[in-house]
Amino acid sequence: MFLALLSSCDLGDQIVMTSVTSSTIAWMRLNKHYTNKSHNHIKSLKKCLSFVTKDTSSINSYLHSILLIANKISLIGHPIDDLDLVIIALNGLSPSFREFTTIIRTKDTFLLFDECSNSRIVSNFIGKCIESLK
């Protein structure tokens, strides 16, 4: 069984399985190897997510870039909570959005990220926020 497993793997996997004596140990080594890669990939994507800022991009492209990274993280089995996505989006806004972010953070109702990424809803909401500041 071990030889069949070894022959079905690529060279990189064969190197991981060097000096093992059974297929069980080989599977355990492969699992550990890919789990470590997966954890490092998740950490890398989450780090990228924490550094996304609006800067000069439009709100739509800013929110889209957050969603792209969040979707990649979800695809590898670690979906990000909607509230966390909203917080990440608010944290990436410049100080010129301070009033807007304060209103969002202090709202009684939970704002979903999908609502943030819908440009019509965002435009209406920003308009309402600006009116409420007057």
Image (tube, rainbow, N blue to C red):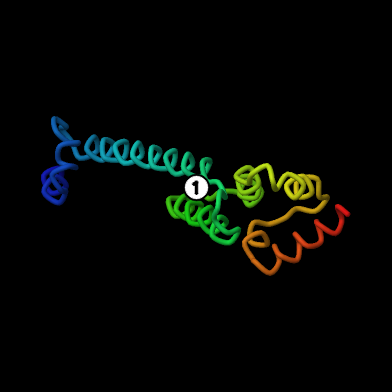
Q: Nearer the viewer, residue 10 or 92?
A: 92
Q: Which residue is mark 1?
A: 78
Number of residues whose C-alpha sits closer than 10 Å to that of mark 1, classed few (under 14), some (14–19) or many (20 or more) = few
96 is higher (above) or lower (below) than 112:
above
Point 44% across, 55% down: residue: 75
Quick check: 78 left or right of 39? right
Which of the 4 image quadrants contains residue 116? bottom right
Amino acid at circle 1 = His
Q: Position of residue 15 (x, y in %)?
A: 15, 37
Q: Secondary structure at mark 1?
A: loop
Q: Nearer the viewer, residue 95 or 120?
A: 95
Quick check: 56 left or right of 35? right
Instruction: Find the residue positioned furthest to the top.
Output: 19
Q: Position of residue 3 (x, y in %)?
A: 11, 44
Q: Nearer the viewer, residue 81 or 23?
A: 81
Which of the 4 image quadrants contains residue 131? bottom right
Q: Position of residue 45 (x, y in %)?
A: 44, 44
Q: Position of residue 123 (x, y in %)?
A: 71, 65
Point 68% across, 69% down: residue: 120
Point 43% across, 50% down: residue: 76
Quick check: 66 left or right of 102? left
Quadrant holding the C terminus = bottom right
Point 75% across, 50% down: residue: 100
Q: Nearer the viewer, residue 23 or 68?
A: 68
Quick check: 109 left or right of 94? right
Q: How many marks?
A: 1
